[in-house]
Image (cartoon, rainbow, N blue to C red):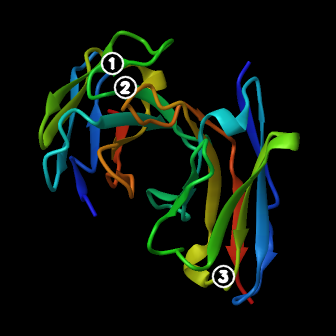
Amino acid sequence: EVQVVESGGDLVPPGGSLRLSCVGSGFTVNSTYMNWVRQAPGKGLEWVAVIFPGGSTYYADSVKGRFSISRDNSKNMVHLQMKSLRAEDTAVYYCARDPRLGWLQFFDYWGQGALVTVSS
Amino acid sequence: DIQMTQSPSSLSASVGDRVTITCRASQSISTFLNWYQQKPGQPPKLLIYSASTLQSGVPSRFSGSGSGTDFTLIISSLQSEDVATYYCQQSYTTPWTFGQGAKVEIK
């Protein structure tokens, strides 16, 4: 059974750093496209970052230069390193798998989410 | 970035009603359009990808159509378990972008 499980959410002061982790089971994270999508309280969904099977990474403009997505193949995990955190980064962060069928991109498995609160 | 606009933002319908949600892209995205359902306190769930392909395990009362800039999600007979917020997402180009959501409630 395919599953993704996030961890690492916490309360962080503005300007602080935090690392989120996502462990996959039932598939190998380095053979697919792994994403982070966030949802601010009471708001909609915002794509944050993706790591390709080959290792290329892409980011939303809102986090570029502050967030970094990486992968640990030995542990079947994906990480999101977040720096210079702002109040507007407060959100539930979901790890989501994109199986990429040919040209078709979509998120087929999502974790339960990790809550990041940026506040003093 | 491609902007996705959904309408209505919320609706109330009776069990058994046909429900239609629309999604408009700010530029043509062919059929690179996905739909998700999010129930309160849960992560989103994929319903439809490539505008009209039903994800495995999703009830057949859900259907999607459209191409270019205009897309539709239809629930043919609304059930109580369909109470949720529905999001469209374009998969034409990064950054992947979502609509603002359409909240469906039971009247």
Q: Is residue A92 above or below residue B7?
A: below
**Chain letter of the residue carrying label 2:** B
Q: Which residue is mark 3?
A: A85
Callout 2 crowding tier (Cα within 10 Å): few <14, some 14–19, many ≥20: many
Q: Amino acid at mark 1?
A: Thr
Q: Residue at x 39, y 52 (%)?
A: B96
Q: Quadrant of residue B43?
A: top right
Quick one: label 3, few (<14), some, or many (20+) residues within 10 Å?
A: many
Numbered circle sitting on residue B8: none
Tell me the chain of label 3: A
The amino acid beneath tag 3 is: Leu
Q: CA distance from mark 1 to mark 3?
A: 38 Å
* Percent of width and height locating residue A85: 66, 82
Label 1 and label 2: CA atoms lie apart by 5 Å
Question: Which residue, as the protein is rendered here, is positioned at the far right?
Answer: A74
Q: Is residue A31 above or below residue B62?
A: below
